[in-house]
Structures are given as structure tokens and as C-alpha cells.
Image (cartoon, rainbow, N blue to C red):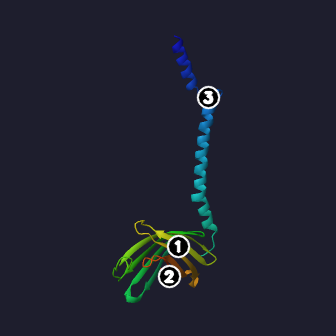
Amino acid sequence: MEMLSFMADTHTYLVNYDPSTIAGAILWGVVAGIFTTAILMLSGQLLQKIVLPSYLGLIYKGVDLRGKWIAQKTFSGGITYHYVLILKQNAHSLKGSMTIAKMNSQPGSPGGYLGDYVQGFEASGVTWEGFVTLNMSSDDRRSLSFVTTLLQVRNRGQSLVGHMAYRSSVVDKVDSEEMTWTRG
């Protein structure tokens, strides 16, 4: 009988949710802490992802670079590169994607020309005082490529002119070239 009484007392002690007991105070303190943490995390995310970007979008008075930008370059031998850059903008912050399509080339020996290809990139950067910096990395990890650009906004926001530095596939070193992007 004593064993049953001890088990009943232990069971009552474990399920006692009364905050006036030590166990109840600890339990409700932990529950309140978890709920407070969850509410603070959700509030922070709401502020960071919705409220602040909306506010910055309302007060931003700089150039609007959102949309499609295109460029094309033709090199010796008729090799042509077509570039398409899609930008999304939130105040000074830029995000988007770029695609490079290489056409009219022949594959060479190992370490030589890759032949025709299409390469996709994820882009992020900023615009400030009439200049744009973008960092891009390939969106497919099986074909690694990196690009950094510094561009100037020209022609009343209708073109971006500057340089693009990238990892060259031909000699596996940093190479660069001039670029002129126009709105597409």
C-alpha cells in the first residue's frame, strides 16, 4: 500500500501544473520562454523581410534598375556571347540572375575552348551614387564560374557601362573585358 501511495504522490507531483509550486513555476517559465522566443523570432523576420524592404522602397529616390538587361559581344572567329541579366531591386540592394550563351565556337583540346554552352549565374550587388557592383556565381556547381562587375549608370538609366572580371575557362586565371548593357 505504501508503494501505491508513493507512486500516486510522485504522479501528482510530476503533473502538477500549478505555478505556485516549484515544478509548476519551472514548467511555466520554460513554456513562456519558448513562446517569447518564437514571437521575437517571427517579429524579427517580419520586420526584416517585409516591413523594412517596403519602407526602403518607399523612400528610395535613386535609379530604378529592375528588369531585363542585355549585352552581346562578337570575337575573332565569329564567336558570339549573348548576355541576359534580370535584376530585382529593393532600394540600393540588387538581386537577380544572369545567363551567358556562347555560340559559333568549336571545342578544342583539354584546357582549350569549351565549345558552345549556356551558363547561368545568381547575382547580388548594390547601386550607389550612379555605380553598380554585382557579384555572380554559377547556379550549377558542376560548372563553376565567378564574375564581378563594376558598372556606371549612363544614358538616363538606359545603359550600364563598365568592366566585368571573371574566371577564364581558357587559361584558368582572372580575365576581364569591357561591357555595355542596355535595357531589354
Return the disc, 3 or 1, that comes first in the chain's sequence: 3
Distance between the alpha carbons at the discs numbered 3 and 1: 57 Å
User: Disc number at residue 99?
Assistant: none
The reply to whether the C-beta atoms of the residues labelled 2 and 3 are less than 8 Å apart is no
Give residue 149's position: percent from left, percent from top.
54, 76
Amino acid type, residue under disc 1 in the picture: Arg
Q: Quadrant of residue 117?
A: bottom left
Q: Is residue 32 shown above or below 80?
A: above
Left or right of residue 1, residue 37 in this image? right
Which quadrant holds residue 5?
Answer: top right
Say left or right for 130 vs 110: right
Q: Residue 76, image x and y in percent?
A: 40, 89
Decide if residue 184 is in sight here.
Answer: no
**Quick one: label 3, few (<14), some, or many (20+) residues within 10 Å?**
some
Q: Nearer the viewer, residue 54 or 44?
A: 44
Badge 1: residue crowd in 10 Å (few <14, some 14–19, many ≥20) = some
**Residue at the disc numbered 3:** 23
Residue 63, image x and y in percent? 59, 76
Kindly identify the residue that appears in the image at 59 percent across and 37 percent down. 31
What's the mark number on residue 182?
Answer: 2
Residue 94 percent coordinates (x, y): 55, 70
Q: Examine the rendering and report whether any part of residue 24 can be seen.
A: yes
Q: Earlier in the sequence, mark 2 or mark 1?
A: 1
Please tell me which residue is depicted at 58% across the width and 23% down the height of the picture. Answer: 13
Disc 2 marks a residue whose amino acid type is: Thr
Q: Is residue 47 above or below residue 88?
A: above
Asked if disc 3 and disc 1 are in contact, CB closer than 8 Å, the reply is: no
Q: Residue at x 61, y 61 (%)?
A: 52
Mark linked to residue 66: 1
Q: In the displayed image of the protein, which residue is found farthest to the front? A: 110
